[in-house]
Image: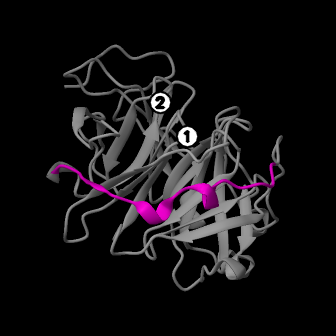
Amino acid sequence: MVTARNPAWMVHPREYVPSWVVLVGTVLLTAGSVPSPHTPQEGVLDRYALGDLDPLRLPRALDEVSGLTFDDEGRLWAHDDEEARVYQLDPGSGDVLSSFDVGWSVSGDWEGLAWAEGRLYLVDSDGVLLAFSPPVAGESADYRWIRTGLGRFCEIEGLGYEPARRLLLMGCKTPRQRELGDRVVLLAFSLATMEAEAVARVSTPMEDFGPFGVSDDDFRASAVEVHPHTGTILVASAQDASIIELSADGVPLAARTLGERVLPQLEGLAVAPDGSLILASEAAGRRALLARVPLPPGVGP
């Protein structure tokens, strides 16, 4: 049951909110990355012990686990990719602590989850966002439906939040415009203006990752996260179980391949308040998995 306690920023769950901006032409999206207020050039990905993963099995209810995110209270949230149902997980055991439906468990192709400015956001493959707050135990969450218009450029997969710019970052899994091919592309929706950004937040040629051993034939964005201690951007790929790291200006810093035997379908990526890296893999015919990698020594805010 959807409760009637709608804060002012919410609308009735069945109401379709029109887009605040209409984007035209791919030239706007391929013009290059937008500089960030802080631009650290030193990455952190290579300092995580990703070769020593010992994943935990997740409950069967999360066989289709997709996005991961931590809220301001340090709670880990996850979702599956077919219905808008959100789970609170214990990052140490993988146990489900609680769960709730968004509205009436809205059906869709849900591809990413992020916590931003006191709310959770789900994104689907067409760039439609659901904005909501965790409800009282036993109830479902009211939500706001936001059309970003970004799905016309890419099939979206992965959602992260960049607090320095107040942007929700969306991974471009499959370009729908030829000009976006052979690149790592992150599109953005501003929470300051409630409009999609006309210029891609990141648009980096895949060939720039060649020295790191990442191929355009294999890399397809599946998760996005901004590291809270460095401001660098982490992008995961389920197809080849790899993670790349970029500076805040989109400069390649590192790449790691975890191996499909360890995480057969890497769909979720989040950084815990203590800096630990949390990774999730869909079942892919086996069992869904959750892995925690501690913060490397000497890394801090």
Q: CA distance from mark 2 to mark 1?
A: 14 Å
Q: Nearer the viewer, mark 2 or mark 1?
A: 1
For the residue labelled by badge 2, is the local secondary structure a helix, a strand or a loop?
A: loop
Q: In the displayed structure, would residue 262 be above or below residue 60?
A: below
The quadrant where residue 42 appears: bottom right
Q: Residue at x 42, y 46 (%)?
A: 68
Residue 81 in view here: no
Q: In the displayed structure, would residue 238 be above or below residue 132?
A: below
Q: Is residue 107 left or right of residue 198?
A: left
The quadrant where residue 244 appears: bottom right
The residue carrying mark 2 is 71
| Lower position in the chain sequence, tag 2 or tag 1 | 2
Q: Can you name the residue that lies furthest to the left here? A: 60
Q: Position of residue 6 (x, y in %)?
A: 39, 17
Q: Residue at x 66, y 80 (%)?
A: 182
Q: Does the magenta-highlighted stretch encompass residue 285? A: no
- Span highlighted in magenta in the image: 40-59
The disc at residue 275 is: 1
Quadrant for the N terminus in the image: top left
Residue 251 in view here: yes
Q: Residue at x 35, y 40 (%)?
A: 91
Q: Does the magenta-highlighted stretch encompass residue 55? A: yes
Label 1 amino acid? Gly
